Image: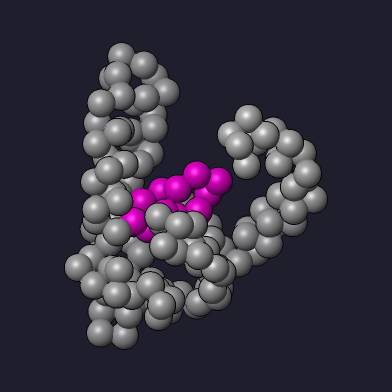
Amino acid sequence: MFIGEFKHSIDDKGRVAVPAKFREAFKNGAIVTRGLDRCLFVFEKKEWDVLAEKIKVLPISQANSRAFSRLMLGGAMEVNLDVQGRILLPDYLREYGGLKKQTVIAGLYNRLEIWDEESWKKYKDKTEASSEDIAENLEGLGI
């Protein structure tokens, strides 16, 4: 289970450290891909397989299914932690996420999200300002 917010810098080679408390989960590698809201998603391989299986069965006759498949699967890259617990983020993913130097890595139960620190702050401020409305709209989910 991944939870919490962590600030990390991207080095000149495009590497970012995975928070120490999560490294064991990624010891056999990870999948990083384009996420929603202009962040990157990082999955353990078994969680990635669950998602990929669901995407695989989406009807290719529907434009939204094809677009989502391309976003998630076409943008995916298998990565491995180096000895210092860092993963290399490919250029195209750093560009997609607008990642500069400072990042926030957020644990969201079954995945990590990597955000540009400035983008994270804007997103979080906006979300926190409408938290009551968001909660009300989730009422039907039993939360």
Residue at left offset 28%, top offset 49%: 48
The spot of residue 34 in percent (x, y) is: 41, 48
Position of 102 relative to 114 (above/below): below
Residue 140 vs 48, above or below: the answer is above
Q: Is 55 on the left or on the right of 10, as rendered?
A: left
**Quadrant location of residue 25?**
bottom left
Residue 108 in view in this figure: yes
Q: Which residues are magenta?
A: 32-43
Q: Is residue 76 left or right of residue 97?
A: left
Considering every residue shown, the one lying at the far left of the view is 28
Q: Is residue 113 visible?
A: no
Say whether residue 127 is magenta: no
Residue drawn at the location 50% of the way across and 44% of the way down: 36
* Residue drawn 49% across the image and 57% down it: 108
| Horizontal and vertical percent position of residue 64 | 42, 23
The quadrant of the image that shows the N terminus is: bottom left
